[in-house]
């Protein structure tokens, strides 16, 4: 057996940045990756003997650490069928090999109609990541690849294979044998393991991985090296969010920077706390002293009683580190740092942030922020938000956000425009201490949280986040919108794997691996939440659509079939016949359901009620979307029948959207949503939401 570590160490000692193809394949073979039969030769006699042993046809190629992209550089001859051709190829290539300080590799000529690519790259956030996709000379042109973070399970590896657009070539098509997925899975898992075992391996590239008689075989390989960089060890221990209780369940709170001036942050935060009926002890600190809202104001932190649970620090950034230390001296163990002006601003702010971090670490306090607009905990009747919110409705949705929006103006919109409540909301700010993975852990065990929605621009502990999320998504839907998704990593690299490893592709693979469903629109963070707040997850992707317009039915069916993972199936015959019975004879009823002929004959309320009841009773249907036409002329029926349908069918989600007059649409929304029926302003929205929620269901079932 070859020592993989010895090969790597000798190459690094010689100043090599890449291993030769021969040594790259030795390492792959040691990890059980199937490689083509080959020999490294120094002269023509050895080449002739090797060709005879392998059997013609053979391939001759230059083998050197600098011999990447051999086809483009003319360093390879394919399809050699006899000794004369071998001699000519050897004469041509040996000079090039010697110039590169290498030798020649003679290899069996592997024939196969399918070429794949796979490899490993070391991502700056997630560490070793494995890639799989369609290979050959068009790898970068097609960019049909998927990624996962190492280590990979068998399920991870197989999911990667189904995600690529060209996944059908892995099956038995046009007389070809199906690809042996057990071998593919093993290869992908072992590539990840190489990255975990050997920090000096920066990239691995196998292109092509040719499928011969259903069995994949590595015919070209490249391993790129780099001296391992010292890295901070990232704890992946799951703690259940321990240590965050003081934020979400405080029994005593101090507001530092409390103000008597209306609309100042130190005044609005107090109004919010009082408006939400916080039942604990509340203390105010301001050097001026006096009273605010009839409560005593303490001149300094030192005047506070010992052991207060939580301090909201609404003070200038420059005095934040000292305020943290003073809070710690009074036994305060949790702080919310509202001030901005840190690393997000300039170099001075960066130094101040470092000083603040030192104060946090030295004092042992837990901190949210800085540069946060606060957090919300409705089960405890509490918020630290300084944006004027008033009473925040209680619900079962929780947010983690690397933005203040969900504790400020977006929360105002949710309260006034979407009619659902929240359980917990936390604005991470600059994440000096409390970060997303531990908040996710807390929400996981929180009985008040039914679903979790996240907005992030960066991961503080990426591998820990994936580990935590993988556990959370077994029982609760987790939906994430990633800001800054188009920022790509460096891709001026020798290996295809690194060239294709954009930041966004790796994040996409990591989130799928963790069971986190990715959103791509900001609005989905509250539209999906609204659907989850009041309706069950759909059991599958089979939807019935009821609309008053054939054009709408056509366009929405196209949307579902072409862009979304939504199926509009055929109805059971008894359902179809009932719909036919209540409709005009000139139209043949089917799914999607054109309901207006029935409305013309029997009236709007009867048509929609009977049509929705019929498809809700159908065993082929998992969810129903109904587009209500509401105008003065065509009629605006009483909508209590929708509430009755909701009660009779508690296991199937009902979503309502509209067409017609805006005043009636707004009135219907205002009536239905507070009673637990989600509505959507635009007809495409419920289907986009269903697509997200169906993915949540699949993630929970696959865990």
Image: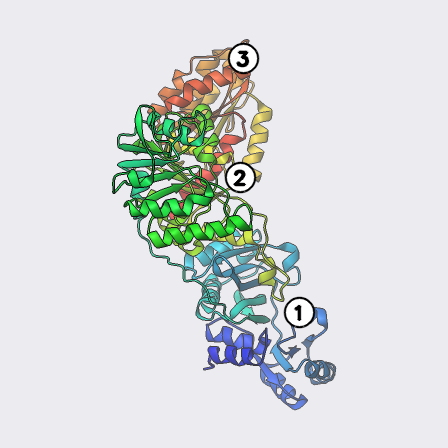
Residue in the foreground of this view, choosing between 477 and 315: 315
Q: Is 639 rendered above or below residue 232?
A: above
Q: CA distance from mark 3 to mark 1?
A: 66 Å
- The residue that disc 2 covers is 564
* Quarter of the figure with residue 373: top left
Q: Is 473 rendered above or below residue 111?
A: above
Q: CA distance from mark 2 to mark 3?
A: 30 Å
Q: Secondary structure at mark 3?
A: loop
- The residue that disc 3 covers is 631
Q: CA distance from mark 1 to mark 2?
A: 38 Å
Mark toward the start of the polypeptide (3 vs 1): 1
Q: x and y percent of residue 226 in the render?
A: 54, 70
- The residue that disc 1 covers is 69
Question: What scheme was used to colour the molecule?
Answer: rainbow
Residue in the foreground of this view, choosing between 673 and 448: 448
Q: Position of 553 compared to 695: left or right?
A: right
Q: x and y percent of residue 441 in the render?
A: 34, 47
Marks 1, 2: nearer the viewer: 1
Residue density around tag 1, few if under 14, some if 14–19, many if 20 or more, within 10 Å: some
Residue in the foreground of this view, choosing between 421 and 548: 421
Q: x and y percent of residue 425 in the render?
A: 39, 37
Q: Secondary structure at mark 2?
A: loop
Mark toward the start of the polypeptide (2 vs 3): 2
Mark toward the start of the polypeptide (1 vs 2): 1
Q: Which residue, as the protein is rendered here, is positioned at the far bottom? A: 45
Q: For the residues labelled 2 and 3, say whether their Cβ atoms are less than 8 Å apart.
A: no
Residue in the foreground of this view, choosing between 379 and 574: 379
Q: x and y percent of residue 250 in the render?
A: 28, 38
* Quarter of the figure with residue 605: top left
Q: Secondary structure at mark 1?
A: loop
């Amino acid at each position: 057996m070859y020592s993989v570590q010895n090969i790597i160490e000798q190459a690094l000692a010689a100043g090599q940045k890449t291993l030769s193809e021969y040594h790259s394949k030795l390492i792959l073979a040691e990890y059980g990756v199937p490689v083509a039969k080959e020999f490294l030769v120094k002269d023509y006699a050895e080449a002739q003997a090797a060709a005879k042993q392998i059997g013609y046809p053979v391939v001759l190629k230059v083998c050197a650490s600098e011999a990447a992209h051999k086809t483009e550089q003319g360093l390879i001859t394919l399809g050699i069928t006899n000794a004369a051709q071998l001699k000519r190829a050897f004469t041509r290539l040996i000079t090039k090999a010697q110039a590169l300080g290498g030798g020649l590799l003679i290899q069996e000529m592997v024939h196969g109609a399918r070429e794949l690519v796979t490899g490993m790259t070391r991502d700056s956030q997630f560490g070793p990541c494995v890639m799989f996709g369609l290979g050959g000379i068009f790898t970068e042109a097609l960019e049909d690849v998927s990624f996962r973070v190492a280590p990979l399970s068998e399920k991870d590896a197989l999911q990667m294979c189904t995600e690529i657009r060209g996944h059908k070539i892995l099956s038995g098509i046009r007389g070809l044998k199906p690809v042996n997925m057990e071998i593919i899975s093993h290869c992908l898992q072992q590539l990840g393991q190489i990255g975990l075992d050997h920090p000096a391996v920066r990239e691995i590239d196998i292109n092509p991985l040719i499928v011969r008689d259903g069995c994949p075989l590595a015919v070209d390989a490249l391993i790129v090296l780099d001296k391992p960089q010292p890295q901070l060890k990232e704890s992946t221990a799951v703690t259940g969010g321990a240590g965050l209780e003081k934020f979400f369940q405080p029994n005593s709170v101090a507001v530092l920077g409390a103000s008597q001036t209306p609309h100042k942050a130190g005044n609005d935060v107090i109004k919010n706390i009082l408006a939400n009926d916080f039942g604990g002890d509340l203390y105010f600190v301001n050097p001026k002293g006096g009273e605010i809202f009839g409560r005593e104001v303490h001149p300094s932190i030192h005047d506070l009683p010992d052991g207060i649970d939580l301090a909201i620090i609404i003070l200038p950034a420059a005095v934040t580190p000292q305020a943290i230390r003073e809070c710690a001296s009074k036994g305060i163990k949790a702080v919310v740092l509202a001030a901005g002006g840190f690393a997000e601003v300039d170099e001075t702010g960066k130094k101040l942030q470092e000083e603040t971090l030192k104060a946090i670490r030295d004092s042992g306090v837990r901190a949210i922020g800085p540069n946060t607009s606060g957090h919300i905990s409705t089960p405890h009747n509490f918020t630290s938000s300084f944006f004027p919110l008033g009473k925040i409705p209680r619900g079962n949705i929780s947010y983690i956000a690397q933005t203040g929006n969900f504790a400020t103006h977006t929360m105002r919109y949710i309260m006034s425009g979407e009619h659902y409540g929240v359980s917990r909301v936390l604005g991470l700010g600059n994440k000096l201490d409390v970060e997303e993975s531990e908040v996710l852990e807390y929400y996981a065990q929180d009985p008040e949280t039914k679903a979790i929605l996240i907005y992030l621009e960066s991961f503080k502990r990426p591998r820990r986040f994936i580990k935590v999320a993988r556990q959370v998504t077994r029982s609760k839907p987790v939906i994430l919108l990633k800001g800054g998704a188009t920022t790509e990593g460096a891709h001026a690299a020798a290996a295809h794997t690194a060239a294709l490893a954009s930041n966004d592709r790796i994040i996409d693979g990591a989130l799928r691996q963790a069971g986190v469903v990715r959103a791509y629109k900001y609005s989905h963070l509250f539209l999906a939440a609204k659907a989850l707040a009041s309706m069950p997850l759909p059991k599958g992707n089979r939807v019935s659509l009821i609309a008053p317009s054939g054009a709408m039915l056509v366009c929405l069916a196209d949307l579902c079939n072409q862009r979304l993972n939504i199926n509009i199936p055929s109805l059971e015959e008894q359902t179809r016949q009932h719909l036919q019975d209540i409709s005009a004879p000139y139209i043949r009823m089917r799914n999607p359901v054109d309901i207006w002929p029935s409305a013309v004959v029997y009236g709007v309320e009867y048509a929609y009620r009977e049509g929705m009841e019929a498809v809700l009773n159908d065993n082929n249907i998992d969810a129903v979307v109904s587009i209500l036409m509401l105008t003065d002329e065509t009629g605006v029926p009483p909508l209590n029948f929708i509430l009755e349908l909701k009660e009779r069918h508690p296991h199937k989600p009902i979503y309502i959207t509209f067409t017609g007059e805006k005043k009636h649409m707004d009135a219907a929304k205002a009536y239905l949503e507070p009673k637990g029926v989600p509505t959507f302003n635009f007809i495409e929205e419920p289907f986009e939401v269903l697509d997200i929620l169906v993915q949540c269901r699949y993630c929970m079932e696959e865990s």
